Every structure is written in C-alpha cells, then in structure tokens.
Amino acid sequence: MKYVGIDGCRVGWFYVGFDDSDTFSVGILPRIDEISDWLTSVSVMLIDIPIGLPSKGRAERLCDREARQIIKPRGSTVFPAPARSAIAKESYETGSAENLRCLGRKLSRQSWAIAGKIKEVDDFLVTRKPGSKIREMHPEVAFCGLNGGRPLLTRKKDREGFDERLGVLKRFYPDAGAVVDAARSKFLKKDLQNDDILDALVGAVTASFYPHLSTLPDVVPIDDKGLPMEMVYARCRYASISNHGSVD
C-alpha cells in the first residue's frame, strides 16, 4: 500500500489502503503501532485523530479553528484538541480538571471518549518518530476539499449523508462502493460502523493526491514534542471531476 486512510473503531483502527494501480485493501489493526511495518513503503497515511497537542495557553489549535470556519455550519464536528497531560489522566473528571488547568477549558465528553486513542497515537508518534509518513486529517474537512471547497451539510450517520459522501468519493475513486461492500462483508457492524468506513476511505482518497496536499493552517505550528498541529486535505478546484482532476 502507498496511500492509507485510518479511523478509530470500536475494536481498534480500521484502514483503507490503495496501491499505485488503485487496488484497495481493508482491515482492522488492534493497535496503532502495527503500522510500523508500513513506514518504509507507504507514501502517506492520513488518520482521523488529533496529532500535535497543546500544553498550555487559552488559544485552541489554529487548525481546529480554521477547520470550523471552512465546514460551518458543521463546525461542531471539530472537537478542541486536549492537552497532552490531560489524556494521561485516568478519569474524565481528572482529565477535564487537568485540561482546565493547562488550557483554561474543560474537556467535552466527546473529546474524553477518544482520549485513549489520542494518547495511543501520540505515544507512537513521539516514540517512533515517523516524520511526515502519518498525518492528521478531519473527514469533514477532507470531504469539503474534494467537494470543491463546499462543505457537506448532511449528517454522515444518516442514509442521505452517507450516500452524498460516497458519491463525492466515487468521483475520484470509482470503486469506492466496492470498498464499503468489502468492509461490510468482512466486519460486523458492532465493531465497525458505516461512518468509520467513510472516514478511513476519504483519508485514503485524499492521501492518493500526495504530494499535492494542502494544510490547515498554511504555516504549521509545532508542539512541544516536535509534532505538527495541522490538518491535511486535497484542495480540489472543482466539485465534479473524474479521477484526480485538478488541485490547487
């Protein structure tokens, strides 16, 4: 695989991978460190999880703020990234209190629900130092980029929203429906939700634009551990194009 999209799911990390011939593969990794074997061959992996975490100050990550503006009125789907010290705590109460101490705001329950996965990825990146091989994406920002800069206003958990997003993906990867079918036949819905499949798939499709990828913000800040605080997406000029069309 050369281009990979990854999303957390109930039993680990669901991935979609493409090679140069657009042949795809799907699977679930129990632990994120299992991607280590791919680092020598992959061009880029895009993962739906915060990378680059704040340590102090009341300002949110600039990428989070810009992402909300780009996809509004769906900006609430972008959760504020937690402080690194907060996700090391053992309970929501202690983690939220630590986040308040460091960043001046409590953690939302939604942010705490993925704190374990944020820490898992953060520990891997800080220890393994894969550089730009694995980068952060937000699915709604990625869909907006593929959709000519127009945010999708439907909810991906609804049938209408799922179908709309799958339609966007098919413009760039005609076999997107086959990816969904393969994942659905391989994994139970209790372990892998339909929106998990969409999120990993938009990551893989976006990754396949490499090296023509854009970032939020344009100038990327670096956190205390040397990790970029960014979101990666493909800035497509037109909402309806075939193959990879045109990018800015």
Image: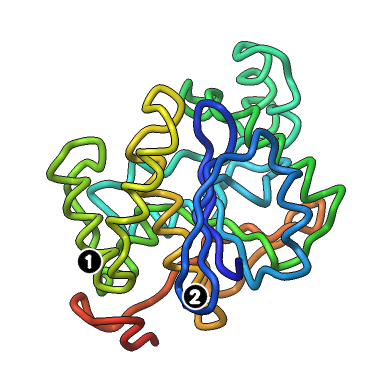
Name the residue at 66% across, 20% down: 95
**What colour scheme was applied to this rendering of the protein?**
rainbow
Using the image, determine if residue 209 lies above or below residue 153.
Answer: below
- Nearer the observer, 29 or 106: 29
| Residue 206 drawn at (x, y percent) | 44, 68
| Residue 179 drawn at (x, y percent) | 37, 54
Picture quadrant of residue 148: bottom left
Q: Is residue 184 left or right of residue 114?
A: left
| Residue 176 drawn at (x, y percent) | 32, 60
Q: Residue furthest left?
A: 160
Q: Residue furthest right?
A: 127
Give how far apart the Cα atoms at labels 1 and 2 are.
16 Å
Q: Looking at the image, is mark 1 or mark 2 earlier in the sequence?
A: 1
Disc 2 target residue = 214
Which quadrant, please, contains the N terminus? bottom right
Helix, strand or loop status at disc 1: loop
What residue type is disc 2 on? Ser
Using the image, determine if residue 80 lies above or below residue 68.
Answer: above
Name the residue at 45% across, 51% down: 200
Name the residue at 69% across, 42% down: 32
Residue 51, which numbered label? Answer: none
Helix, strand or loop status at disc 2: strand
Which quadrant, please, contains the C terminus? bottom left
Picture quadrant of residue 172: bottom left
Disc 1 target residue = 150
- Nearer the observer, 75 or 119: 119
- Nearer the observer, 122 or 161: 161
Name the residue at 56% across, 45% down: 49
Q: Is residue 236 left or right of residue 210?
A: left
